[in-house]
Image (cartoon, rainbow, N blue to C red):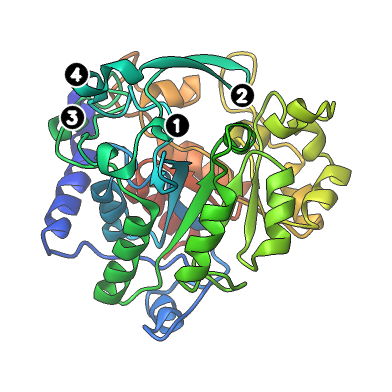
Amino acid sequence: MKRKRVGLLALAGLALLSVTGVGVGSASAAAVSDTSGGSADAAARGRGHHDPVIIGHRGAPGYRPEHTLASYELAYRMGVDWVDVDLVPTKDGQLVARHEPEIGGTTDVAKHPEFADRKKTVVLDGVTTTGWFTQDFTLAELKTLRAVERIPQNRPHNTLYNGRYQIASYQEVLDLTKRLGRELHRTLGTYPEVKHSTFFQSIGNPTEPKLVAILKRNGLDRPDAPAIIQSFEVSNLIALHKQVRTPLLQLTSASGAPADFVANGDKRTYADLVTPQGLREVAKYAKYLGPDKAQVIPRDKNDNLGTPTALVADAHAAGLKVQPYTFRNENPFLPANLRSSAEPDAYGDVFTEEAAFFRAGVDGFFADQPDTALESLHAFLGR
């Protein structure tokens, strides 16, 4: 069944060539411009600033281990202008790009005997978690580790790159973004996500002051900055709205409640945030809504793609742009009727799924395979 993926894997091969200097074409998704000519480039490629935006979710993790500089570079070279960067703090106050503070599943830390005694158990947003955590390592110590593929059962080809890439700091991601922007003559940006805000505040190592400092130091504290701050929590975004002019995105989940609500005894849930009244409250501090895609188009009782909800229309009425997460090509992440087989690493019909969301009116989305998502976008736009 793996032969069914040959065509799409060939795109990854082309992208690999581009990382070594051979371009593969691009499409601007930025709604900002700078002296490198971002606006002119967007027009030249036939893309308007109001077209839906594809965000490389953790870079291009369908082809490289997530949150590595290689993953981000590949995403940009595939043509997206934005990448998603999850941020967690280190022991010495740096911000690094990891999906979670626990790094046992995304690095080779377990193979480092010098760090064996740092394995521990913590309660992370109500979930008991055992492993190694970034807050117990300095940046220099983390740099001795190497990234590995997080979901090898779905992406066995990515294991080829295990051990090749370091953990990246957010500053390194920004430096890469600036360098590639100059090379590619495009305005490139990041969506930094504040992970587990309440938890890190509780241990005296908050992410937000560090993020504000980095944004200001890099000239990103402005409304038209190529940066959009994300969080699944609410109170930190409300506070950030008063501290920076960088746009904000409120993430929501299809279940549960924001961790800060739970910690403060607030009985509201994510479902309350996406009601018309909740969305009007979100719009007081954020410009974007990042819902679970199931909140836009839920699955039916047979796990097939269902009928769109009113969320996009309600969010637009509140003045919010809607960018759901996460689109992935592999069968387990697709609606049942769009899967090609039971094989967990084979691709299904993600084009049909992504087309349905464009028709539902979303303003873009987060995708693990940026090239596929851009192909869907071009088909939707007819150019």
Dot 3: element: helix
Mark nearest the camera among 1 and 3 is 1
> Disc 2, disc 1: CB below 8 Å?
no
Image coordinates of residue 125 in percent, x first then y, are: 61, 24
Whichever of callouts 2 and 1 sits on the residue coming sooner in the sequence is: 1
Q: Using the image as rendered, state which of residue 112 and residue 99 is in the foreground.
A: 112
> Disc 3, disc 4: CB below 8 Å?
no
Q: Left or right: 108 with respect to 331? A: left
Find the distance from the CA under tag 3 to the CA under tag 4. Answer: 28 Å
Q: What amino acid is labelled 4 in the image? A: Pro
Where 224 falls versus 98 (above or below)?
below
Whichever of callouts 1 and 4 sits on the residue coming sooner in the sequence is: 1
Image coordinates of residue 304 in percent, x first then y, are: 56, 22
Find the distance from the CA under tag 2 to the CA under tag 4. Answer: 28 Å
Mark nearest the camera among 2 and 4 is 4
> Disc 1, disc 3: CB below 8 Å?
no
Whichever of callouts 3 and 4 sits on the residue coming sooner in the sequence is: 4
Q: Left or right: 199 with respect to 227? A: right
Residue under label 4, please give it. Answer: 113
Where 73 falls versus 195 (above or below)?
below
Find the distance from the CA under tag 2 to the CA under tag 1. Answer: 12 Å
Residue under label 2, please give it. Answer: 125
The number of discs equals 4
Q: Residue at x 41, y 49 (%)?
A: 94
Residue 157, numbered circle:
3
Q: Residue at x 36, y 49 (%)?
A: 370
Residue under label 1, please give it. Answer: 100
Q: Left or right: 266 with respect to 97? A: right
Q: What amino acid is labelled 1 in the image? A: Glu
**Residue 227, visible in the rendered structure:** no
